[in-house]
Amino acid sequence: MPVTDAITFAGLPSAETVHRWAQPAEPNLLAAALASLDIENHHEWAWANYKRAVRDLCKKFAARRLIEIGGGRDPLFDPTEIEQLHVEMTVNDIAAGELAVLPPGYRTACFDVSGDISTVAPLRNSFDLAFSRMVFEHVPDGRQAWSNLYELLAPGGTALAFIPTLYSLPYVLNWLLPDKVAAAIVKQVYHHRTDEADPIFPARYSWCFADDARIRTMLSAVGYREIVVQPFYGHGYYRSFPVIRNVHEWFTGIARRRDWRLLAGFAYIAARK
């Protein structure tokens, strides 16, 4: 047989390799879905539109089985909204007491998203969409939490987490200070944060970053195939301090324009199985 039938010419790629290079990249449907929201990278937009973002992902990916991680006593959707979405919603929390105060009409699941989920084995591959807000900063092992979500999602399912991010100064202080001191400061700034009405839980900030490369590397290793990290800049912790607030808003404007991810205040992190 001719030598060229057995090997490729030295230094040249095979026909198979050239064909593979010529293939168009797989479209990131998740990125397109989020882009259609016309996102503004400001923290006020993130808070005002999170429910809309979840609704939109439901519609775009025809999600019918949803789970809210850490929904506890304050789930994102009320029973009427769930009915209007035509979905089967499960509200999760690590604490049975948080789920116990929910009004009738909610399906619940009590387990630690970053712990051993073997006790809820029937829930594996069960959900089309898993979402959370202000939860992942409290889990001790963020990578394990994302890995567990991957197990809970059905093939093609989506996970969406709304998180505060390091290294915004208030969260760095919250991370470094003793839990009791950090909780006392939060209660001082936000008087509605009481143990009875809106408890404060210890914050760990494991994998709570807006750094695209860092998060993408971790989630790809878990197995996710489409990943989006959307940063949001600013926060409301300085509202009662006019001078500090004005300086913060000025500097936040610069960070937003230049997309300084280390200084983001929040992020939507989304990934598809």
Image (tube, rainbow, N blue to C red):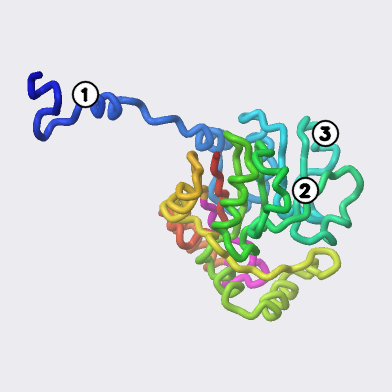
Magenta span contains residue 164:
no
Based on the displayed image, in which of its 4 quarters is residue 235 positioned?
Answer: bottom right
- In this orientation, which residue lies closer to the viewer: 76 or 141? 141
Mark 2 to mark 3 CA distance (whole Å): 14 Å
Q: Total label count?
A: 3
55 left or right of 212? right
| Quadrant position of the C terminus in the picture | top right
Q: Looking at the image, is mark 2 or mark 1 nearer the viewer?
A: 1
Magenta-colored segment: predominant secondary structure:
loop
- Reading the chain from its start, which is encountered first: label 1 or label 3? 1
What residue did someone put label 3 on?
83
Say what amino acid the circle numbered 3 marks: Glu
User: Mark 2 Cα within 10 Å, few/some/many (few <14, many 20+)?
Assistant: many
Question: Disc 1 on helix, strand or loop?
Answer: helix
Nearer to us in this view, 37 or 273: 273
Q: Which of 170 and 54 is in front in this view?
A: 54
Residue at the outermost front position:
1
Q: How far apart are labels 1 and 3 at the CA level?
A: 54 Å
Residue identifier under label 1: 15
Counting residues from the start of the chain, the first of labels 2 and 3 encountered is: 3
> Badge 2 is on which residue?
91
For badge 1, the amino acid type reads Ala
Whether residue 49 can be seen here: no
Could you tell which of marks 2 and 1 lies nearer the N-terminus?
1
Residue at x-position 78% and y-position 70%: 191
The magenta region covers: 231-245
The residue type indicated by label 2 comes to Val
- Looking at the image, do the residues carrying marks 1 and 3 touch, with CB atoms under 8 Å apart? no
What residue occupies the far right of the structure in this picture? 104
Residue 30 showing in the rendered view: yes
